[in-house]
Image: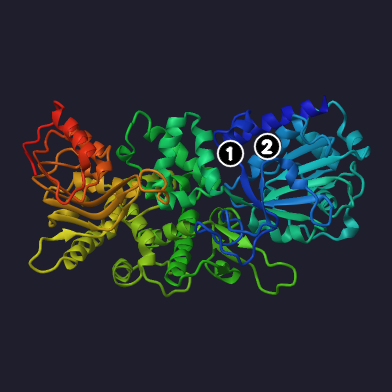
Amino acid sequence: EHRWDSREHMVRESRQDRELGTCPRESLSLHSHFTTLTITREPRSKHRAKDGAVGTGQGCASTSSRAATTATTTTMLFEPSGDGQAPQVVVLVGAPGMGKTTMVRKVMVEWGEGALHTQFDFVFCIDCKAIVLPMEASLADLVSWCCPGLQVPAGKILDDQKKILLIFDGFEALGFSLVHPEAELSSDPREVKPLELTLMSLLKKTLLPKASLLITMRPTALGNLRQCLKGENYMEILGFSAARREEYFHRYFENPSKADMAFKFVRGNEILYSLCVIPIMSWTICTNLEQELCGKKNLLECSKTTTGMMMFYLSQLLKYRDRDNPQVLQQFLLQLCSLAAEGIWKHKVLFEEKEIKDCGLDLPGLLPYFLNERIPKEGEDHESVYAFTHLHLQEFFAAMFYVLEDDGETISSLGRLEKDVNKLLESYNKSRKDLNVTVRFLFGLVSQKSIEYMDKTIGCRISPRAREKLLEWLQGRNRGLSHPGQAVKVSEMDTFHFLFEMNKKSFAQSALGHFTDLDLQDTRLTLYDQMALSFCIQHWAGLGSVTLQGCSFHWQDPEAQLDVSVPWVWWAGEQPGQVRCAEPLFSVLSRRLQWCRLSESCCAELAALLAEHPGLAQLELADSSLGDSGVRLLCEGLRTPGCRLRILR
């Protein structure tokens, strides 16, 4: 009975948490939605993670086989360590959105189903974020308060010293300093004391010394807790491994075809795929794509930009913050963006505690959403250091630095960095190609849609003044790349990325209006690349020819075998018609297509194009090895009623 009662309480708390947005789309059938998280035995120190994650709590990293594990069942949280001793206290550390509360729910569900009965007779979960706890209480009062449906009085359960697990989820929300003298601690579970003292007694093992504790918290709050614990086992949630990201998409959508479509979209965008190491980012992207992809058969019809996804993530992250004082958030973001930009310019991802304080970023209500703290290990004499949850998030806020409005009085964290957009663009053009993602986000942030979204959902004011500078830079940059006497052409893929992130028809028309040719050489075109090209070609009125020499199209995993390889495609004609791109980019046809060094295996694709694009009048196949079977496939395409080809060379 007591197991059922506690499980019912857990269900009630789960519903409350879901309304608070801490674990979106969670249902009571947790097993069907739970995706395995990668967990390391102790917070990392100097190791830099893959996928751009840096520092404590920042993503699935490359860790040694000894330190890393995957928590498929919650029994692994209390597994014996190398000395054969099972830990009594497990501290589960993770950045916001990494899945700490989900792991707590998994513990409760598995215990309710009997999986943990050999380890624990009773499991009590105290959600420090979602309930208001009394100022003074005994441990028995606390358990009764959080689990009101118990059939056996809490005091009796605690007196019997059964195998008990007490869970404190979101411990940092209590805000306790944990610095009281040990003489004030309690050993009686019925003794009423200030709540902080009761919890300190539990942590220091003067109260229920045989009980097990599971504490979840953010890295920024770890320092004070460490002073109270002995013999604890620290574990850090690193997020989703590469295989688990795809699994999460299939668990979210349930419909396999929708899951495949959504995951292809993300896998084709290197920035988003890297960010999906963070569970809440995976949820953000799935939620955003669910409506966008509804009813669409073609991923290239999706208008979701990388910047748009980042803004939606930011709005979800700050959804339940205090909105009564938007000036505080605006000021915090100004300094945060300044810190991010300083770091990007200096190739810096770790920031000293003094820098955080000097910037005025040491606000407990905001700091943990953006920066994670790495606590020095015992014996280390330096201060804590901080890092952004992911490198791409730092790049996003660095871009915001250049466009976020202020009152004219705010300066950068060190007083040296100016909001000079031209300097950023010219540095990128000349030598700093590592600024690519920052520049890409810059274009996305100054679109009118982004400005309105940020103001409405977050309360941030973004200035559109940089838009003209970006337009002038794009026009001048591509002119400079064309040789005298030649057609004015665009030959850099990043141009199309920038215009796609802006996602404004009139801006793309103005930026491309003076150019006549598209010329890409030896380029691996991901799905994101093809989306950007598709968008730009639709709004490129003066486009006269497209040359794709040695380019390849990727529709699945960019690292897998190529889906379509195009040694040489040259297209010329009048203004392109409607760009559909359900096939690779060579679907963008008007009158004439020259396709060199075509292999026999490509003839089926070509035959389909002949039937589906009646505007194609002339086809030239030079230096191709079609073979008899290839010619037969081509002839099938020529016979179809939809084919209007007049000249075949």
- The residue lying at 43 percent from left, 31 percent from top is 257
**Residue that protrudes farthest toward the front in the picture:** 628
- Give coordinates of residue 315: x percent, y percent: 46, 45
* Screen quadrant of the N terminus: top right
> Does residue 152 lie above or below 65 as drawn?
above
Q: Name the residue under label 2.
A: 105
> Does residue 120 lie above or below 549 as drawn?
above
> Does residue 60 lie above or below 616 as drawn?
below
- Give coordinates of residue 49: x percent, y percent: 56, 60
Residue 289 in sight: no
* Screen quadrant of the C terminus: top left
Q: Circle 1 — which element?
A: loop
Is 26 in front, or is 263? 263
Q: Give the left or right position of residue 517, taking residue 437 as reference.
A: left
Whether label 2 touches label 1, CB < 8 Å: yes
Looking at the rendered structure, the kind of residue marked 1 is Cys
- The residue lying at 37 percent from left, 71 percent from top is 418
> What whole-number distance in Å separates the C-alpha atoms at marks 2 and 1?
10 Å
Q: Circle 2 — which element?
A: helix
* Number of marks drawn: 2
Q: Name the residue under label 1.
A: 23
- Give coordinates of residue 345: x percent, y percent: 42, 70
Is 592 in front, or is 27? 592
Q: Give the left or right position of residue 303, taking residue 476 as reference.
A: right
Residue 519 in sight: yes
Is 142 in front, or is 303? 303
Looking at the rendered structure, the kind of residue marked 2 is Arg
Q: Give the left or right position of residue 254, taking residue 561 as reference.
A: right
